[in-house]
Amino acid sequence: MDVFEAATTNIAVRDFHPKFISEGELKTILEAARLTQSAKNLQPWYFVVIKDRKTLDDLAHLMKGDVDEELLKRSPMAVAIIGDMRSEFWLFDLGRVSQTMTLVAWELGIGSCIVSGPEPPDRENYRMSAGEILGVHDGLKLQELLVLGYPKTSAKVRRKNRRKLEEIVFMEKFGQPTRQAGK
Ligand SMILES: Cc1cc2nc3c(=O)[nH]c(=O)nc-3n(C[C@H](O)[C@H](O)[C@H](O)COP(=O)(O)O)c2cc1C
């Protein structure tokens, strides 16, 4: 699978086999995360691998109000993605590192979904409580969980629901059509 295929076929996976991904696969995903670019090379990220069912269930209890609040209960494992907020670009960098992990997992046949918790105003409380469960210290912030596993059904057949190119890409000035967008 090349990068384009990974980027254009990847979708959120929400139903998994109960089996953990292999240690080798997990290491590959984490190694790709480690090597991701970040602003000023500050690498403002930490990861906690969570396989313990009790911890996953404790985190799942905090999910009431998430768009898919049962997702953690259906997931064999998760990786908590924790940011160091001292970097100006910490949130941007966490987005990049999450995407790296997602695409590398996808190439290995592993599905994933970001879990960001209940809708505001409860989301920040959730992040704090989830961070406490995982022992995240001051100055660092648990931003999201990435659930990972082998997809229960073939995850590649679902169509992506996305805006058209002409709605989002412009030429020279915002609002001016581009040829790439078919205008
Ligand atoms: C930053 C981010 C946060 C997300 N948070 C959640 C979440 O809290 N719960 C959830 O069920 N899905 C979450 N998702 C998954 C998206 O809802 C999903 O990727 C999107 O609807 C597009 O669907 P598709 O991936 O199946 O094409 C999140 C995705 C991203 C990129």
Image (cartoon, helix red, strand yellow):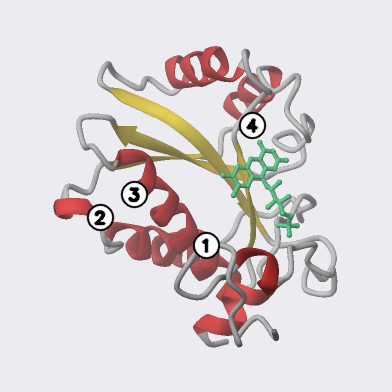
**Amino acid at dot 4:** Arg
**Amino acid at dot 2:** Ser
CA–CA distance between discs 1 and 4? 49 Å
Up-down relation of residue 111 to residue 106 (above or below): above
Disc 1, disc 4: CB below 8 Å?
Answer: no
Mark drawn on residue 93: 3
- Residue 21 locus on image (x, y percent): 59, 59
Q: Residues within 10 Å of mark 3 (few under 14, many from 20)?
A: many
Q: Residue at x 41, y 67 (%)?
A: 28
Q: Which residue is mark 1?
A: 174
Mark 3 or mark 4: which comes first in sequence?
Answer: 4
Q: Residue at x 82, y 71 (%)?
A: 154
Q: Nearer the viewer, mark 3 or mark 4?
A: 3
Secondary structure under tag 3 reads helix
- Residue 101 locus on image (x, y percent): 47, 60
User: In the figure, residue 76 lies in which quadrant?
Assistant: top right
